[in-house]
Amino acid sequence: MFDNLKKLCLLCGTSGNEEKIREYIISQIKGHCEYNIDPLGNIIAFKKGKNIPKNKVMLDAHMDEVALIVTSVQSDGTLTIDAVGGVDPSVIIGRQVVIGDKKLPAVIGSKAVHKLSKSEREKKPEIGSLYVDFGATDKSEAEKYVKPGDIVYFASEYVEFGDGMIKSKAIDDRFGCALLIELIKSELKYDAYFTFTVQEEIGLRGAKTAAFTVAPDFAIVCETTTASDIEGTPESQKVCRLGNGAVISFMDRSSVYDRELFNVAFEIAVDKKIKCQAKTKIAGGNNGGAIHISGKGIRTIAVSAPCRYLHSPSCVVKKDDLNACFEMTRELYEKAAVL
């Protein structure tokens, strides 16, 4: 799972541009399941298990990562940008990035500090005030290499450090994809459907069509979620903690999760000795927001890995938590199959 996570994180693929991620996932699951690609670009896979389940269960992870998109080329050869997904401008100033399929090296620039007015220094920067500098001398030269619509990705290494920590871009949600690949390659107790979905970061779009196609009774969304577990953060605002295991949500900004599945997750945690924690702040959202209201309605739960610095070039997770998410997801799917 960790080998796949590394390879997936180092690939680039934002909303509507998931081709490389899709190709890699197919290379890993081919021969282990049946699959097809829908018109939007979702991978919808079916894996035969040892038994036929009472309920149809779908496990979901999204393929896209947050990124930036070029909106125009300026006279001095720098590029104006906008966000693809939720990118905080304050965490990307001065960061290294790459542009387009050719991965042209560049940096995120902003107005020099000594040029800022007092009011500008006191407020949070906006994405429209930033630009990408890739060394072009002027607009004419820049346009030989870059055009509006090109994608700008974070340049980030995959690093293991400290006490079992991992740092990389795109752990949201390449971890979910790596988890599902591992499940597909394993021997399953019951038949199951797996969806690797597109365009989550700009509105849960792929999940909406995938859930409609599969029409499951239950869905498990495999994700990452914000951990604010650093010194000085009030306990009620920490959301979840690295090292405390899989995160189970009861509610976020897009879903109220199935109460029975929520309780079952904690029963599993005790019975199977899997580390597990509740998400303690109603914030964020994931594909569950589109899945649970699809068709006649789908009973949905999310299993998330706690992640510091989410949607940044340096997402940080703990390997023990990722293993706990894998075990919890497997156990939850087996329970949902026969509820």
Image (cartoon, helix red, strand yellow):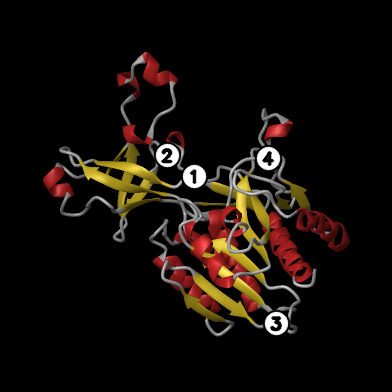
Tag of residue 312: 1
Residue type (three-letter) at the residue carrying disc 4: Val
Closer to the chain start, of discs 1 and 2, is 2
User: Which residue is at the far top?
Assistant: 118
**For the residues carrying marks 3 and 2, which lies nearer the camera in this image?**
3
Nearer to the camera, 48 or 76: 48
In the picture, measured across the screen, residue 305 lies left or right of residue 139, that is right
Residue 60 drawn at (x, y percent) = 59, 64
Residue type (three-letter) at the residue carrying disc 1: Ser
Q: Which residue is mark 3?
A: 49
Residue 102 drawn at (x, y percent) = 29, 60
Whole-number angstrom distance, CA of label 3 to CA of label 4? 35 Å
Q: Which residue is mark 4?
A: 239
Residue located 40% across and 20% down the image: 121
10 Å crowding of disc 3: few (<14), some (14-19), many (20+) = some
Residue type (three-letter) at the residue carrying disc 2: Ile
Kind of element beneath mark 3: loop
Residue type (three-letter) at the residue carrying disc 3: Gly
Residue located 58% across and 82% down the image: 33
In the picture, measured across the screen, residue 195 lies left or right of residue 39, that is right
Closer to the chain start, of discs 1 and 3, is 3
Kind of element beneath mark 2: loop
Closer to the chain start, of discs 2 and 4, is 2
Kind of element beneath mark 4: loop
Nearer to the camera, 177 or 207: 207
Residue 254 higher or lower than 6, as above or below: above
Whole-number angstrom distance, CA of label 3 to CA of label 2? 45 Å
Q: Quadrant of the N terminus?
A: bottom right
Q: Which residue is mark 2?
A: 92
Closer to the chain start, of discs 3 and 4, is 3
